[in-house]
Amino acid sequence: MSIGFYLKLAWNGIRKNKKFYTPYLLTCIGMVMMYYIVSFLSVNRQVMSMNGGETIQYMLMLGCGVIGIFSVMFLFYTNSFLMRRRKKEFGLYNILGMGKRNLAKILLRETLIIAAISLSIGLFCGILLSKVAELWMLKILAMDVIFSFQIEWNAVSQTFWLFGVIFLLILANSLRQIHLTNPIELLHSETVGEKPPKANWIVAIIGVALLAGAYLLAVTIEDPISALIWFFVAVIMVIIATYLLFIAGSVSFCKLLQKNKKYYYKTHHFISVSSMTYRMKRNGAGLASICILCTMVLVMVSSTTCLYIGMEDSLRARYPRNINLDMTFDSIEKMNEGTADQIRQASEETAAQYGQDLSRVLNYRVAGLVGCIMGNQILLDESSLTEFDWNGYSNVWQVFIVPLEDYNRLMGQNETLEKGEALVYTTKGAGYGEDTISIGNGEALRVKKEVDDFADNGVDAMQMIPSIYIFVPDFETVAAPLLGEKNITTGTVSLHWFYGFDLSCEEEEQIAIAEDLRNYLRQMELENGADWLSASLESVEENRSAFYGLYGGLFFLGVLLGIVFLFAAVLIMYYKQISEGYEDQSRFEIMQKVGMNKREIKKSINSQILTVFFLPLLAAGVHLCFAFPLIYRLLALFNLTNLLLLILVTAVCYLIFALFYVAIYRVTSYAYYSIVSGRR
């Protein structure tokens, strides 16, 4: 046989099965396009030159890895639908005299055609839309638009090789299936039903146990560190449990419906239940895949959208004032020698040169350390933690001892404390809950109450661990014994003076004032010698671009990955309906011949689809509800603690997704009805 003969058979096979191959080709093109766009942005020199460009490109590289891994799994999954449809055709070729070597040649040419179309159109569309993606990202990051067009050949090469390997692996898997199947099995592959799995109750119990464990983790974890540690464990448990429960549940659900004679022995229910029973395991696996993808879309889009909307709040948590100064001293005497007064006066004079007055002035002293809270004691010894003691690490806190007079001045309060008493305040949603607190080997302080708020200093926003502020009436008495003592970070307890203020001027003037104050600090250090160990001065406007780069990059990547996963869920729905439609077509034809009319067919189809089709959406909603506390704890690591915002964004995302899901349901159910009813 000539080479052209195999090529013609391959092309005819694709053309005659275009209802299956067109969505598959569109999927391949879409995955190639999305991968190139993310890869293009991850190596683009103009993105690198932006403020925060390195952070953005690091996240985009992670996105490339996620899309690459997902492409392998998803294209294998969708190709399995094609192979199930084509096995009957290959079985016929085999019976007519074609050997498996000849079938392999047809499959090779089909794969080459699909790879050529996918890579050429996908890269072409990716290159065309890469500039659109770049402009959209610049818009999200509030950056200036760059009017230029370029092709990143490294991204082209990377995309070509990745998907070339994927298509090669898909070809090898297809050849394996053909090689291991005899002609008769190939010919009847579409009409072979499934046997229910043995020990179905064991599968169900394992699934329930895993899901209950994952839900328990999600709702009981209190601190962000533990949430970060256990998040991926909980995700894996939910994925495994979803597959087990949907597969086992499909079997049990069908058996339950069959036992209910009043329900089962009705025209529109009998056909739908028997059709579901015919493919119980595959039906459950498909629904589980849709459920997991829906959950991934909802979690990813809602969390990144919430981060993006609350970006300004998170920025001000990190930089609580327009100008923020942190000075470290080695003794309480040097802290009180008048250095603070000189810097406050210099700040007022510098701002006055630009016609500005200081507002919302932040001014307080702290003794800072890191300790491990065990019960009512803050342990400072590093041996209190071991390398693999995850629970120990989840108890690590940033500790700030603050004079009560500074608390009253900043918060406008008039709290009073006796010697040996303290007020406490905790961050990141963590609580203390003990009646007393002792630091290191010091005497226990009685906790008079936990206050609701305090002026942040930006240090807590930089830490993954929560912070506890301890307000005491005798600052020197409590702090002095701790100076020089080692804490669990192998550093010493340090004295800080936090000073900051807001300005009403434009961005350029704020940056100029910050730079003038830095110069003043340098000059003061050169002329008089430094009374401080270190000084750090930060301006919110100087760091805004890098901050927006992080949060905007997460939002951009979240939306892109959300589109990829949504596209995958839609395609699985479509293939599920189309493949099941062809499998059920002969059964509905028989039922029509014995008197079943079009109206009854439609009622039976609606019964079948409505029985199972909305289960993934409902299950995804349940997953999302139980995951909500864990998501909230993780977002606290990004300084986002606005619970109402997260609730509203999550609810809106779910409602929008549900409307989209209903629209897909209508389209795919119509396609199923058209096939089984014989409508062209």
Image: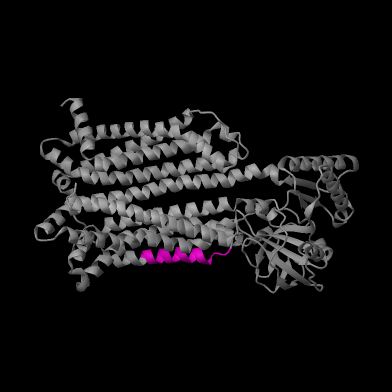
| Location of residue 649 in the rendering, given as x and y in whole percent from the top left corner | 51, 57
From the top left corner, tell me how far across and down residue 596 is, in percent.
Answer: 13, 61
Q: Is residue 414 left or right of residue 86?
A: right
Quarter of image, res 455: bottom right
Q: Quadrant of residue 317?
A: bottom right
Q: How is the image coloured?
A: one colour
Farthest-out residue, left: 594
Front residue of 241/441: it is: 241
Q: Is residue 295 left or right of residue 259?
A: right
Quarter of image, res 378: bottom right
Residue 297 visible, this orientation: yes
The percent position of residue 644, horizontal first and vertical second, equals 56, 62
Residue 498 seen in the current view:
no
* Residue drawn at x 46%, y 65% as measured from the top left: 215
Q: Is residue 221 magenta?
A: yes
Establish if 274 lies above or below 259: above
Q: Is residue 10 above or below residue 388?
A: above
Q: Is 315 a magenta residue?
A: no
Task: State the extent of the magenta-drawn residues as a range.
Answer: 206-222
